[in-house]
Image (cartoon, coloured by chain):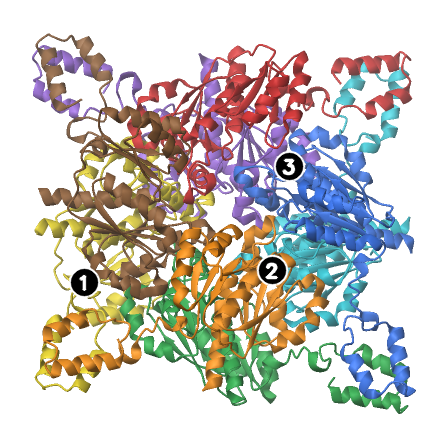
Chain colours: A brown, B yellow, C red, D purple, E cyan, F blue, G orange, H green
Amino acid sequence: MTPEVLTKLLTDIRDGNVSVEHGIEQLRDFPFWDLGHTKFDVHRPLRNGFPEVVYGEGKTPEQISDIFSALEKGGNILATRVSLEKATQVQSVCPEARYNTLGRTLTLVKEPIHFQEGEIAIVTAGTSDLPVAEEARATCEMLGSRATVISDVGVAGLHRLLNHLPMLRKARVIIVVAGMEGALASVIGGLVAQPIVAVPTSVGYGASLSGLSALLGMLTSCASGVTVVNIDNGFGAACAACKINNLCGDSARS
Amino acid sequence: MTPEVLTKLLTDIRDGNVSVEHGIEQLRDFPFWDLGHTKFDVHRPLRNGFPEVVYGEGKTPEQISDIFSALEKGGNILATRVSLEKATQVQSVCPEARYNTLGRTLTLVKEPIHFQEGEIAIVTAGTSDLPVAEEARATCEMLGSRATVISDVGVAGLHRLLNHLPMLRKARVIIVVAGMEGALASVIGGLVAQPIVAVPTSVGYGASLSGLSALLGMLTSCASGVTVVNIDNGFGAACAACKINNLCGDSARS
Amino acid sequence: MTPEVLTKLLTDIRDGNVSVEHGIEQLRDFPFWDLGHTKFDVHRPLRNGFPEVVYGEGKTPEQISDIFSALEKGGNILATRVSLEKATQVQSVCPEARYNTLGRTLTLVKEPIHFQEGEIAIVTAGTSDLPVAEEARATCEMLGSRATVISDVGVAGLHRLLNHLPMLRKARVIIVVAGMEGALASVIGGLVAQPIVAVPTSVGYGASLSGLSALLGMLTSCASGVTVVNIDNGFGAACAACKINNLCGDSARS
Amino acid sequence: MTPEVLTKLLTDIRDGNVSVEHGIEQLRDFPFWDLGHTKFDVHRPLRNGFPEVVYGEGKTPEQISDIFSALEKGGNILATRVSLEKATQVQSVCPEARYNTLGRTLTLVKEPIHFQEGEIAIVTAGTSDLPVAEEARATCEMLGSRATVISDVGVAGLHRLLNHLPMLRKARVIIVVAGMEGALASVIGGLVAQPIVAVPTSVGYGASLSGLSALLGMLTSCASGVTVVNIDNGFGAACAACKINNLCGDSARS
Amino acid sequence: MTPEVLTKLLTDIRDGNVSVEHGIEQLRDFPFWDLGHTKFDVHRPLRNGFPEVVYGEGKTPEQISDIFSALEKGGNILATRVSLEKATQVQSVCPEARYNTLGRTLTLVKEPIHFQEGEIAIVTAGTSDLPVAEEARATCEMLGSRATVISDVGVAGLHRLLNHLPMLRKARVIIVVAGMEGALASVIGGLVAQPIVAVPTSVGYGASLSGLSALLGMLTSCASGVTVVNIDNGFGAACAACKINNLCGDSARS
Amino acid sequence: MTPEVLTKLLTDIRDGNVSVEHGIEQLRDFPFWDLGHTKFDVHRPLRNGFPEVVYGEGKTPEQISDIFSALEKGGNILATRVSLEKATQVQSVCPEARYNTLGRTLTLVKEPIHFQEGEIAIVTAGTSDLPVAEEARATCEMLGSRATVISDVGVAGLHRLLNHLPMLRKARVIIVVAGMEGALASVIGGLVAQPIVAVPTSVGYGASLSGLSALLGMLTSCASGVTVVNIDNGFGAACAACKINNLCGDSARS
Amino acid sequence: MTPEVLTKLLTDIRDGNVSVEHGIEQLRDFPFWDLGHTKFDVHRPLRNGFPEVVYGEGKTPEQISDIFSALEKGGNILATRVSLEKATQVQSVCPEARYNTLGRTLTLVKEPIHFQEGEIAIVTAGTSDLPVAEEARATCEMLGSRATVISDVGVAGLHRLLNHLPMLRKARVIIVVAGMEGALASVIGGLVAQPIVAVPTSVGYGASLSGLSALLGMLTSCASGVTVVNIDNGFGAACAACKINNLCGDSARS
Amino acid sequence: MTPEVLTKLLTDIRDGNVSVEHGIEQLRDFPFWDLGHTKFDVHRPLRNGFPEVVYGEGKTPEQISDIFSALEKGGNILATRVSLEKATQVQSVCPEARYNTLGRTLTLVKEPIHFQEGEIAIVTAGTSDLPVAEEARATCEMLGSRATVISDVGVAGLHRLLNHLPMLRKARVIIVVAGMEGALASVIGGLVAQPIVAVPTSVGYGASLSGLSALLGMLTSCASGVTVVNIDNGFGAACAACKINNLCGDSARS
């Protein structure tokens, strides 16, 4: 209920077009999240060509197809954690959907995406971290931020990382994707001034504890200003990075 | 070594003012982090009136006093995790230092701080989370971002939180400080569009596992875009939040 | 051994119909759980049309079929954690058994269930929590309590939850089913006065630790009066909720 | 904002006593948690002579004294986890406050407590569990439920427990307080039909892991219908038990 | 209620000396754990001069003194985990009580202890494990088994252990007390044929995790037939060892 | 090298039949574990018809077959953790081998087993614990102790357990096999005086943590004298129980 | 960039053969890790016939084949964690590659390996630890150190280990591979003076926690001088052992 | 028993100077660890001026003083984990003992230490890691290896570390001491070819889990060849490093 609608309702009451009783009835269902300037505005994340987001894990191909079909009329959609099998089934129903084999995302773009100016750099420690990085990259793109993946620059070969410093320095936000000990976040955190979102991955074995060691390492990073998301959560890191990028974009426009 | 210095050196070699051997000698100590446009620029975080940061835990009052005294000539300094006893001893040597009893920070400001335009909101679930929130607030101030603490708006009394929504909506970045189950980060994450930095606290007992439960809860938050720092790490959350705020400030100026 | 049987035995001894030796022999096997007013009464949970309960995990279809067939003469039966394959095999033997695909329960109702007056509300944070919720709902029904499932009202979209508040307020007991950070229990616990039984689910990945994070979050809930059952234990939550509901029903009748 | 107030406002608008603009202004601050029949009613838990609750841990004696003094005009107050030292200081300011040394509660009763009919039984495995049990008992009393503590009936001496069965059978709700392996909850859960709220305690050493073993044991109890609260959380168990007891009391009155 | 008493009761009923109603009344309180040959016999562990056992941790000196004074008339008593301060206070009231400074046991022997024939060997890895070993030794003595402590024969100096093999071979049961990695249990388990009760100790730091590493090491011992008790539980190990020793003693006598 | 062999060697040296140099050579390889009365006697566990033991997990059918074939000439053999597939392959080579489907043991008996007099009782909490119990039973039999399995007497139905008390009282050693919270060990430990070996099982889900909760519960048992082996380690429990039983048998014979 | 190349560049600038601008351009890409005597020398580990190393887990057969084919021109290659299926596919493309079924390594040797003088002993506790030991052995060989595997000498049969002492004493470095409780490292550490690298393996079940118990046991070893690598990390242990062996080799040559 | 002694004994037997019976008697106590070339040689670690080592934690000042006094006649001694209070007491008895306040070691040198040629570099991430580094340094010195501490070169300020590379390259072994995420070991491991012994420290808070996060990070290091010791175990790291250094020294001499 927008201020305009509310004004109209109250004017109708004043003018006798709407009875007090009917007014109460309508206000009873007054969407509480839309109270003038303090409105909740939960729809904002979905405005401006932002995609509908579907977590594909544990959903059947039919359920995913239904959601994709419902979007036919417009809007974009991003499904994460979609297996190749599910994607193929969905594509048989919705041939426009595009599947990202590495990042396991399935996307449908019906409305053009307006990209922010700033770029996001996604850095991985090893090639095994690429699926998580690719999920992040695909998410960034759907949320309107351009992102570049720089892979295999783990701290055991420091020169590879240092070679990429100029590119890192140009990004607005940096997503660091690393398994095993997750040291890459600390090292990059000590080299650049930008916000860093660290994603631990479940890459590794034994004492890597399915990503817990990388998670703990990133949380206790000696580099201040590193923040962390859940293990393998490339999507979440991209959301956080895009929120930061959008924030700047907003102020840049004003 | 700036490009200018390098040009000067090479020109001197070409002109015979400097021998090849001497040139090699100088380049041998060539600061590797200053290679033209790819320079490391590790000092950038410390420019613009940014403070020197001291982690007070495990340092003796003498060590802290030495650092504070060394700054006498200029610059600002922020010491975190300083006990009242230590602070009192440092202040006897360096009377200008100001102690924040709640946040346990000791600060010395010799150069005026230039504040960013954007504000940071710091929200706590309970009053017991206030020390961590205050450490974050004091850090934000020293890093050049204004911050406001909104306390005791935990999810068990949702109306208190909702009352503060307008203020939260005006902040550029939101720091959520919560112990126990840490649910506050998820709830705020679902209500606002800004980047959220969540700080789990060690408040609680038993199954709160000294903050691990809040940490895990925040990492697995169902609200996308929430990032997390270490338990009780108000300082780290403030660093991350200020990096985001600074980023916007930079683009705002350009 | 009921008081009547005991009276009969002692009278027979007094009247010489039963020898003292034979009396001792019978009393030796005196069921110790039936000592007048202090009897154990372990059968009470199974009275009044309550079902026989079978934990299907790790049982063969043959074992489950045997139990179902044994009930042919009467009584009801609830089997939980039954896979579709097992259910199909059991149904080929016992065609009256009904399978709940989502909740994975297999039930046989030979005696009419007498329902309590009060209702139980089962709330889930996400659609992935539905199997656990459905197990709880099916259990409630077999135990004589009507239950309604309200799904996908997680805290990241608070307005969806608040829309359902009136329905929640009418329930006698509320079961909250949530994975990831489990914050839903705290939020509902702050909004309603009824007893809340929280069920953490293993939905999630990485730091959700197969449900442990939700479990810890619910245990450390800042909302007082929330109690918790094992991860994914929809059956146990329903048992607890029905015990509460029955208790009220009992006093309502008196 | 009650329906009456809303009717008055809308009538004033209709009658021209209030302008549309002013109406919008008032509705903007419309307390969203009071929308006719769907109002949040967060105050309900505090009605009917229910106490204000203070978590004493980490609060200074001054803070606690302030809260107690504020209640001078009426109402009751329950402070938990108050050390003897703090209690003494508060009592010097507020001499009416009564301290429970064992349960570490400090209470002030200015309004008579109306007790429910049903009773709550609190059972402990060992004498070391008594402080938690006493916290639960004192909480029950302040919340309007009578409670009796039956102590030292751990499963290693089963006969002691069985002797108390008649008393347990008469209670409406049973709180089981046990450390070490927490087996008491399972055993009682198999003997009675009432709802059971289990409180693991941190009593024990080594593999008891500060109460985690008891917690895990209770969560995986083979007795269905046992629910669990946080370690040492006598207060929370009492809240849950009283909510259940109140529920029955409510229906009994209607 | 012994068989004799039961016979008497039934005879009285038969003879009309006791009415049927009175007989029911008496049988209602029939101690259920004394049903002829199947009686529970919970007192057996306390027969034959066995001590009363008190867990001193968390008990006040007054409480311990009370228990010791109550035994004045006869019987023996063993209190474990008694600090020097508490012991001194108890001894001021009960001067006959003897304190074991190393094992922290306080004992009172009023009835002579009859010792079993077999001996128990208690082996420690290091001198820091001695307090736990001494608690075990003192417990064994009070339970009627002679025990010898062989200390500081950890696996890092294998020759020291091998020198003691003849003594180990003569014991009926061996208690192995070890912290750190707990390897001693495996090594001894591979050298002797007797039952081994392993006690992990909290000796160590860092990755010894307060005894958890030793505990896990002993549980996964490659030597079959090693059983384990809780960390630092010298008392429990002695109980188990004495039960085994008693068992043999019993058959030896028959 | 037996004392006889040593005497012979030294006598030969004295008599000049063996040179000093040759004597040194032989003594250099002097089996150090056979030094007169202090000999290691590692073979003792394998004497008296005791079986060769094979841990089948991770061994190929060929490897197991080889071991079974090697025993053709005599001796007994017990292989644990053998899958049905492996067993079938081994039996095609060694048809005398008998497979225990429930306990997953494969055995070959070429020499008659001499059984001890005492019996071992194996008690399980639920039917799902039966495979572990059966592994224990089969192991006991191969090690020369008769064992009886009493299943499904978990503490949630205490009367079932109490019915079996007479049988439990007759056993020399009791093995308790239980998953979930593992409370059965504590309850039995409080009812009988015999040594109890507790085996936690991985039966359960969620907070049962693959048997860790049962393990912790048993380790922190409030019943003194309970010892514990690794999760699902029916074989290890049987080894410990048989060592105890053998010990008594030995003294009984002397 | 070697000193020679730098001298040439500066001389060219001096002589006017290279312009200052071009000199800056070249120095801009000056490999920062090659600054005269302080050069990083990251290539050193790959010199002297050292192999290229590939972690096969998670790589496709095509990716591995590509790497092997790229080496056609020379150099050696070691791929670890290669399944039989992958190896077969790679061998179809690169028939010279040799597969080690037990250690799961795939190797290609085009340049002769120069072996160090010293030998490495690899000791395993059980036969199930052999795959990890074999990975270590194959790695040692490719890195230029001869290694011998001594298997199945776990501490439960100490005499087997002691028989191999002479061989262990001759090795320069000892790798100890053990699962379950990992006690073997402590025992060997107490017997020999050489550096010991311990590898915990995931062999075991239940409380072995997939190798964590062995890891913790080795870390808390009572034998000083034992160092540890990740669970199942035979490759890493071999790298460490070869680095030590090489170090000695280097000094031996000088 | 040396070969010479054995030859003498056998010769005496041959010559009739010693009876066969007496020979057996002597050989019965034949020190089994001294069997010609296969002797255990447990004393070797203590030869060549190596110190006696005392773990001071949990020892009384009296116990430590006794050990120091016993050495009066000669030899060196190193006591670790000695508090200032204890050290002072020991020094009052043994004034020659020197206390290292930072490393908490107490040493007594009566015999000159012969130092190896190679040096050991000890690198710390932060100044808080210095006590552990100093314990390592003091241990190295007592074991005969010179060691230098390079402190505060954590990965968040990479340039500080790189400045020290030349010094690191000259060391034979490098000990890396780091808390928090422990990333320093990985980074150095990627830069140098020497063996690296990593020591996690308990420096940090929250998710650093008292050093467990650093431990896990070091174990899962992406740099091959890093080995790890227990948390805060500077002594153990020094032992391992010195063993490596000694090994080279031996070969250097030959």
Label 1: which secondary element? helix
Which one is closest to the eye, mark 1 or mark 3? 1
The local secondary structure at tag 2 comes to helix
Q: Chain of mark 3?
A: D
Amino acid type for the residue under numbered disc 3:
Val
Left or right for B250, reference F227: left
Disc 2 and disc 1: Cα gap in Å?
53 Å
Q: Is residue H14 above or below residue H215?
A: below
Asked whether the residues under the numbered discs 2 and 1 touch, taking CB atoms below 8 Å apart as contact, a structural biologist would say no
Are marks 2 and 1 in one subunit?
no
The mark found on residue C63 in the picture is none
The answer to which quarter of the image holds residue G11 is bottom left
Tag 2: residue type?
Answer: Leu
How crowded is the residue under tag 2: few (<14 C-alpha within 10 Å), some, or many (20+)?
many
Quickly name the residue at label 1. B44
- Cα–Cα gap, marks 2 and 3: 52 Å
Which residue is rendered at x = 25% and y = 81% of the image?
Answer: G3
In the image, is residue F10 above or below residue E33?
A: below
Circle 2 is placed at which residue position? G130
| Residue placed most toward the observer, B134 or A82 | A82
Residue annotated with mark 3: D153
Q: Decide which of F225, A59 is in the foreground and name it.
A: A59
